[in-house]
Amino acid sequence: MRLTLKEKVAYGLGAVGKDMVYMLSASYVLYYYQDILGVSAIAMGIILMIARVFDAFNDPLMGVVVAKTKTKWGKFRPWLMIGTVTNAIILIVMFAAPPSLDGGGLVAYAAVIYILWGITYTMMDIPYWSMIPAFTEGGKEREGLTTLARSAAGVGSAVISILTVMCVAALGNVFSSGESKMITNVYQSDEASVYIMETDENNNPTGNVFEYPLSTVNVEIMGTDKIFEGIIDVSDSNAVCTGTAGRWDISGYGVEFVKGDYADEEQTEIIDTEPVLVISVPSDVFMEMAAASSMNVDIAMKSNLEVERVGFKYFSIIVGILFVVFITITCIFVKEKSTVDIETPSVKQMFKALLENDQAMTIVITIVLVNSATYITSNLLIYFFKYDLAGSDWTGNYTLFNMFSGGIQIIAMMFFFPILRKAFNTLKIFYISVFSAIGGYVILLFMALAGLKSVYPFFVPGFFIMSAVGMLNVAVTIFLANTVDYGDLKNNRRDESVIFSMQTFVVKLASGIAALIASICLAVFNIKQDSEVVITYSSMLEKIDNYRNNVVETISSGSVVGLRLVMTLAPIIVLIVALLIFKKRYILTDSKLEEISRELKSREA
C-alpha cells in the first residue's frame, strides 16, 4: 500500500523538529559558551570533538539496540519518543547554564551536558531514519520519502538559522529583567562626554561625529555580576535624549557606555576619569541632534550578553516543546508495515560488516567532509557578521542573510533537485552541487577580502553554496540508502539500523570537526566579545577615532583577515577532498543498482 498524504506530512514534521534542535546545537553552542559565557574557544573545541569520539561508540550500539527491540509499537517508535523527550530536556539545560559557574566548573558543565545531548539525540535520530525501509516500498517511493524528509529537515534548519538571533534578542529583552539584578544604581554625571555617531543605511559609521562635552547623563545598568563585568556594549530598553533642538527616543539605536572608574592593566590601581557615552544614529536623527547646543541623556540599560544569555534559555524551551510535539505527531500517524526481523550482529561483527561495505564507508567519508565544510561556515558566520561586517544592526543583517540562504536551501531540496532529477541522475546532481558550492566559496573569498560592508552582495555566493547544500543533503541520503542493498548482496545481511546509525554519527562528527576548526580560528585570531577585559577610557577614545575615520574594527584587522580565510579556504579544501574520494571509490551507478536489484530478487526466488 502506498504512503498516504497524512503519513508523509507526519514524517516530514518529525524531520522539521529534529533538525531545529540539531541546528540550534550545531550552530550556536560554541557561540553561547565561548562568546557569551566566556569559556575558552579551545576548551569548547576539545569538548565538542570528545563528544563526537564518544558517539563513535554510542551511535552504532544504538543501532543494535533498535534492531533488537520488539514491542507492540514496533522497533522504532518507542526509542523515537524516549529520545525526543530526553533530548529536549537536555537541550534546555544546555542553553541554561547557571551564570554563577565560572572557569573549570563551567567547562565541566558544558562537557557533561553536551555529551548527554549527543547520546539522547542518537536515541531519537537512528530510529527516525532507520524506519524508512520498514514502512515504504523500495525504489521511487523510498527515494521520494527520503527527499521529502530531507526537505523538511532543511525547513527545520532554516527556521533556526533565520529566527534564532532575533528571537534571542526579543526574548532576552522580555525576560532578562526578571532574572537579572541591578548591579549599578542610577549613575549620574554632569561631566560625561557624549558622542553622537552618524551611521549609513548599513549601520556603519560615516565618519561624522558630534561631541557634547558638558551633558547630564543618568544611567541604570542591569545584569549579573559575571555577565556584565567589563561590558560596554548594551541594549537600551529606555533611552531618551533631550536637547535644545528637541527630544529623541534612541531606544532602537546603538549605545555604548564606559563608567568613569576602571582598574589599570595590572589591576593594582583604580583610575578616575570622566564617563563616556556613545550613541549611533542614522543621518536624519544625527543632523537634528547635532543642532542642539546641550544634551541631557536618560538611559536604562542591560548588558547585551545578559540579554543573549537569557534569550537563548527561553528560545531553547520553545524549540524543545515544538520538537516533542512534532515527533509525537510522527509516532501517532506513521506505523511500521514490514514485519521482517532484522538480524542483529554483535558490535564486533557490526564494525566488521561496515568495513566490508566499501560503498557505505565511501558515503560515510563523503558525508563527513561535505558537512564539515558547511558547518565550518555556519559556526563562523555569526562572528563574520558581528565582528567583520559589524555595524549596530549586525543582527538584522545576519537574520536577513540567513533568511535568504535558508530559503534557497529549502527551494533547492524541494524544487531544484526534482527538476534536475528529470534531466540528470543523482550521481550527476552530486557533482553539479559540489562544483556549485566550491564556486560559491571562491566568490565569497574574493568578496570578503575586498572588505565589502553591505550584506546584499553576499547573497550571490550564498545562492550557490546553499542551493548546493540543499541538493547534497538529499543526494548523499539516497546514496546511503542504496548501500543497504549493496551490503545485502555482498554480506548477506541487511543492516539498515547499522548503516543509518553511521549517518547520525558522521553528521555529528562533522559538526565536531568543524567546531574544533572554528574554535582554533577564534583562539588563534583572538575573535571574541570584549567581556574578559575592562574597557578603559583611552580605548573608548581610540574606538571613537576609528569611527571618525569610518573604520568599524571591533577586532583587529589581522583577526578579520584570519576569520575570512578560514571561513572560505577551509571549506574549499574539504570539498575538493570529498570530491576526489567520492569520484574514485563510489561505484553504485543506476545500472549497477539495477543489477544488484535483479540479483537480490533472483536470490530470494
Image: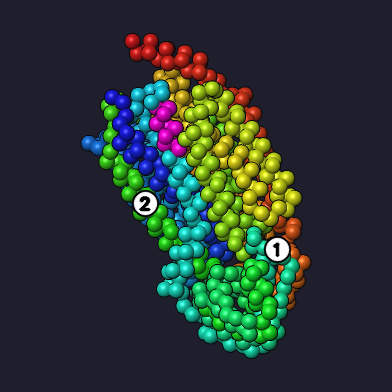
Which residue is the extreme one toward the right? 549
Q: What element carries label 2?
A: helix
Count neighbours of disc 2 (C-alpha within 10 A) and say few if under 14, some if 14 to 19, many if 20 or more. Answer: some
- Look at mark 2 in the image and give the residue it sits on: 322
Does residue 47 show up? no
x, y percentage for residue 369? 59, 37
**206 inside magenta stretch:** no
In-front residue for pair 362/250: 250
Q: Is residue 518 above or below residue 263?
A: above
**Amino acid bearing label 2:** Leu
Q: Residue at x 55, y 79 (%)?
A: 240
| Magenta range | 142-151
Count neighbours of disc 1 (C-alpha within 10 A) and say few if under 14, some if 14 to 19, many if 20 or more. Answer: many
x, y percentage for residue 585? 59, 24
Quarter of the image containing the N terminus? top left
Residue 35 - label? none
- Look at mark 1 in the image and give the residue it sits on: 552
**149 inside magenta stretch:** yes
Q: What element carries label 1?
A: loop
In-front residue for pair 314/391: 391
Q: In this view, does 353 lie above or below 125?
A: above
Which residue is the extreme one toward the bottom? 190
Q: Of helix, strand and loop, which mostly describes the magenta segment?
A: helix
Q: Which residue is drawn at 49% across and 80% down?
A: 182
Tally of numbered tags: 2
Badge 2 or badge 1: first in the primary sequence: 2
Q: Which residue is drawn at 73% across and 53% down?
A: 451
